[in-house]
Image (cartoon, rainbow, N blue to C red):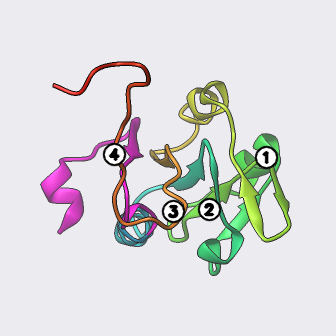
Amino acid sequence: MLKELLALRKGDVVSFVGGGGKTSLMLALAKELAPAMKVVVTTTTRMGAQELAGLQVFTNVQELERNLRPGRPAALCRAVEGGKVLGVGPDVVDRITSFTDVVLVEADGARRLPVKVPMILNAPFQ
């Protein structure tokens, strides 16, 4: 369903941005792709650790590489602190593409707000 709409193939990195629904969409896509692909879910910001319930969570790239298999999506983060998953840098996302089929990245935090509006400071409204 989603994978056909997005025409995903091996080596793709999909970034989720904006307010509301990123995590839910990302996890639904991971579940759909997992039976046939090695899928890793990650973030470059922060997200609630409870969001990753049901996924095997790794904080070490080498351990992820050794254990990643089709059938069950995995999650990669830098650390889990105070109920939050701390994200990895873009260089780590690039690195894991060498052994994954698809990487799904929550690429900005909305802090559970339904809408995000970018602001340009010190610029007149036009």
The label nearer to you, 1 versus 3, is 1
Residue that label 2 marks: 74
- Location of residue 5 in the rendering, given as x and y in whole percent from the top left corner: 13, 56
Residue type of the residue flagged with mark 1: Arg
Residue at image mark 3: 70
* 1 or 2: mark nearer the eye: 1
- Which residues make up the magenta segment? 1-23
Q: CA distance from mark 1 to mark 2?
A: 14 Å
Foreground tag (2 vs 4):
4
Relative image position of residue 115 (x, y in whole percent): 34, 59
> What distance separates the C-alpha of mark 2 from that of mark 4?
31 Å
Mark toward the viewer: 1 or 4 = 4
Above or below — where is 80 with respect to 63? below
Amino acid, disc 2:
Ala
Which residue bears the numbered disc 4?
117
Q: Nearer the viewer, mark 3 or mark 2?
A: 2
Q: Determine whether 72 is above or below 69 in the image.
A: below
In the image, which disc is placed on residue 78? 1
User: Between residues 101 and 109, which one lies in front from this camera angle?
Assistant: 109
The reply to whether the magenta stretch includes residue 25 is: no
Query: Which of 77 and 112 lies nearest the eye of the viewer?
Result: 112
Looking at the image, is mark 2 or mark 4 earlier in the sequence? Answer: 2
- The numbered mark, 4 or 3, whose residue comes first in the sequence reads 3
Q: Rate crowding at label 1 as few (under 14), some (14 to 19) or many (20 or more) other CA atoms within 10 Å.
A: some
Residue plotted at (19% across, 50% down): 6
